[in-house]
Image (cartoon, helix red, strand yellow):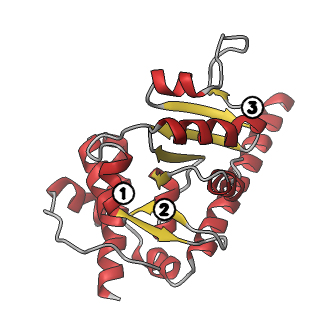
Amino acid sequence: MVRERTSPLEPDPVIEFYKKDIDRTLIRENLRRSVRERLENLLRLQQFREELERAGRSAHRKR
Amino acid sequence: MTDFRKLLETLGQAGVEFIVVGGVAAAAHGSVRLTADLDIVYRRTPENLLRLVEALRPYNPYLRGAPPGLPFRWEAETLRRGLNFTLTTMLGDIDLLGEITGGGAYEDLEPHAIVLTPYGFACRFLGLEKLIEVKRAAGRPRDLEVIAELEAILEERDAG
């Protein structure tokens, strides 16, 4: 993977606040994957969301 | 569901000059967040508009969320007259962006793009730092968590 030049970003206190809640174990795990695997995971997430939506609609109709 | 692979392949095979931005670029860099569409910044040269139109034509692009029957014509002239288009296609949803806030046009972003080959063919993706910069520039409250994650990825990447 080609990396772009690294330059320091000015810390933003609001973003730093949000950063405290980020699960870095997920990020580290994902960074160990190839780009292809990351995009395939994204596709699986999409499929899962669609299945949930379908199930939700179906449950709503039955009520 | 959006078939990212097929969309990227279709655009690449047609020789369309584009840079992947947004959620798919974030996912390529390591984001675990869900995104439903492919966002690209496309080069607005006449030749590239023609390539883009021909590439997507077989997949019936139409304005996303618009009622059917609008006089929307999928042609280069339509792209030339507009700038950003949110489309739905048979391959899924794609946003064609002529410019993005904080990043500008294709030519402005190209120096900040990196070439990745996730599926065996080369695609330009916006670099992680520039992606953070444009998200910050957009200033949307809903992006705050996204920016926080992207910055954490940058930190983890640089530490590793």
Residue B134, above or below B112? above
Q: Say which element carries label 3.
A: loop
Amino acid found under the numbered disc labelled 1: Glu
> For mark 3, what is the residue?
B60
Neighbour tally class for label 2: few under 14, some 14-19, many 20 plus, Cα within 10 Å: many
The Cα atoms of the two marked residues, 2 and 3, are separated by 24 Å
Residue at image point 68% right, 48% down: B2
Is residue B144 among the parts visible in the rendering?
no
Using residue A51 as the reference point, say whether residue B7 is left or right of it. left
**Could you say which is closer to the camera, residue B6 or residue A41?**
B6
**Callout 3: chain:** B
Label placed on residue B110 = 1
**Could you say which is closer to the camera, residue A2 or residue B50?**
B50
User: How far across and down, in percent of the image, does residue A40 sit?
Assistant: 67, 67
**Could you say which is closer to the camera, residue B37 or residue B73?**
B73
**Could you say which is closer to the camera, residue B13 or residue B109?**
B13
Query: In the picture, residue A5 is in which quadrant?
Result: bottom left
| Extreme-bottom residue of the structure | B160
The Cα atoms of the two marked residues, 2 and 1, are separated by 8 Å
Query: In the picture, residue B88 is in which quadrant?
Result: top right
Classify the position of the C terminus of chain B by image quarter. Answer: bottom left
> For mark 2, what is the residue?
B124
Using residue A29 as the reference point, say whether residue A47 is left or right of it. right
Is residue A30 among the parts visible in the rendering?
yes
Residue B108, above or below B138? below
Amino acid found under the numbered disc labelled 2: Arg
Label placed on residue B118 = none
